[in-house]
Amino acid sequence: MITLPKLTYPYTALEPYIDEETMRIHHTKHHQGYIDKLNAVLGKYPDLQTESLPSMLTDLSSLPIEDADKTLIRNHGGGHVNHTFFFSVMKPDTSKDQILIKRILKQYESLENFKNEFTQTALNHFGSGWVWLVEDAKNALKLYSTPNQDSPYLTGNMPLLALDIWEHAYYLKYQNRKSEYINNWWNVVKIL
Ligand code: MN
């Protein structure tokens, strides 16, 4: 049984950029919801209980399970790992990741360039989804968006930074002002 990971900070910690109510609902309703549905499907396959989700998602096509259940793991397993990671990059008490910053500077020349490109990718993404900075199998940095709850693990990539651009991540406070949400979100990214 997978249980909801506790946040390492209070729901108020990201105010005023991300409000307490959004954080509470996002964590206790949305993230919990993905976990509940994931547990329901994994419950059918005792052999999968000890597998890690990243490796399940990376090798999804070869798992010996029904196709409909692969889709459920893609959606709800993705929902679980994506949210766990997203909440972790916003830790208010975490110091900056100097190694990641150096790698970003090497490829994007400045943090400002990187943030602009990341923000533009978020604005260009149509519908629900995520924006990612990842490391690919050749250790190169890549920036892209994915639809729904698709995880970078599906293509063997390792997440380094994530932004949730589902409306549930910002609608209570920002309504249709997606660009204001994204610009404010940079204030609570503590690793850069
Ligand atoms: Mn979400």
Image (cartoon, helix red, strand yellow):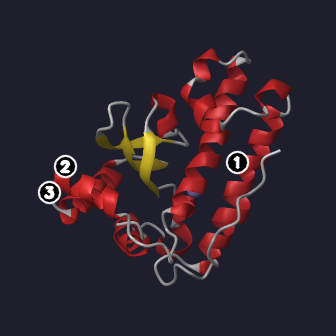
Q: Which percent across, then down, holds residue 45?
A: 82, 26
At x 38% / y 31%, what residue is drawn?
137
- Above or below: residue 68 compared with residue 109: above
Q: Which percent across, then down, holds residue 30?
A: 68, 57
Q: Residue furthest left?
A: 109
Secondary structure under the numbered disc 3 in the rendered image: loop
Residue highlighted by disc 2: 107
Quick check: marks 2 and 1 in contact, CB under 8 Å?
no
Instruction: Specify which label sits upstream in the sequence, 3 or 1.
Output: 1
Residue highlighted by disc 1: 34
Count of number-bearing discs? 3
In the rendered image, the quadrant that contains the N terminus is top right
Q: Specify the amino acid type for callout 1.
A: Tyr
At x 33% / y 37%, what residue is drawn?
139
Q: Specify the amino acid type for callout 2.
A: Gln
Q: Residues within 10 Å of mark 1 (few under 14, many from 20)?
A: many
Quick check: marks 3 and 1 in contact, CB under 8 Å?
no
Mark 3 → mark 1, Cα distance in angstroms? 37 Å
Instruction: Specify which label sits upstream in the sequence, 2 or 1.
Output: 1
| Residue sitting nearer the eye, 85 or 18 | 85
At x 40% / y 64%, what residue is drawn?
178
Q: Which percent across, then down, holds residue 43?
A: 85, 33
At x 65% / y 48%, what residue is drawn?
80
Residue 83 visible in this rendered orientation of the protein: yes
Quick check: marks 3 and 2 in contact, CB under 8 Å?
yes
- Between tags 2 and 1, which lies in front? 2
Quarter of the render that holds ligand 1: bottom right
Q: Which mark is residue 109?
A: 3
